[in-house]
Amino acid sequence: MKKTPKKKTPVKKFESKITKFLDQAKVKYGVIEHKVVYTAHDAAQTTKKKLSDIAKVVLVKADNDYVLIVLPAGKYVDFNGIKKALKAKKIGMASEKDIVRHLKTKIGLLHPFGSEYNLKTLLDRTLAKSKKMIASAGAYTHSVEIKLKDFEKLTNPIKGTFSKAKR
């Protein structure tokens, strides 16, 4: 007796502002589903990826403007490098309230596409050397993997030394 094949249930594709943005830009990317994470470091552990491939995104206040800094998850922000690149007098971390108020996003969901926030994006050289990066997809349970050259085309970041090694 011949068995009838079971119908496959269609898998619902993950969709967020970021994936829609990448789809509109006709950029190839991958979506990585993982357990709930709140930091880039947690994303690296959960996905079993190297810290150097995971993008940590930090909101910084430079004088009276906000700027996104994209650096490897295993590094610290180098405020002196940012200050030089932007020719700013005063640099500091934005508060969690600033993130919620100005970017209309939850803590832990910052993505690296500064153009979507109408912000300048600074890309650390050590991350820029990678072929791909993994960053938040705008959800605690999903990340996107994108080629660095595509990320650079989309954001036109200022490249420089914006990170330093953890002690």
Image (spheres, grey):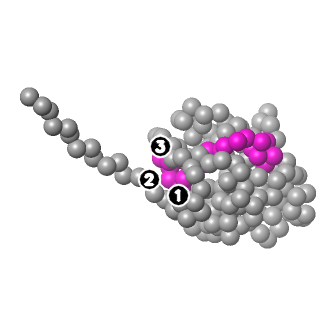
**Residue 148 can be seen, yes or no:** yes
Say which element carries label 2.
loop
* Residue 102, image quadrant: bottom right
Say which element carries label 1.
helix
User: Where are the magenta residues, as a range?
Assistant: 124-143
Q: Residue at (82%, 41%) from the top-left corner?
A: 164
Neighbor class of circle 2 (other Cα within 10 Å; few <14, some 14-19, many 20+) is few
**Vertical side of 137 occupied by 24: above or below:** below
Q: Residue at (88%, 58%) from the top-left corner?
A: 85
Neighbor class of circle 3 (other Cα within 10 Å; few <14, some 14-19, many 20+) is some
Residue labelled with disc 2 = 14
**Vertical side of 1 occupied by 21: above or below:** below
Where is residue 9? Give x, y as percent: 27, 46
Residue 125 on the magenta segment: yes
| Numbered marks: total | 3
Residue labelled with disc 1 = 19
Q: Tag 3 or tag 2, which sits nearer the N-term? A: 2
Amino acid type of the residue tagged 2 in the rendering: Phe
Amino acid type of the residue tagged 1 in the rendering: Thr
**Residue 107 can be seen, yes or no:** no
Amino acid type of the residue tagged 3 in the rendering: Glu
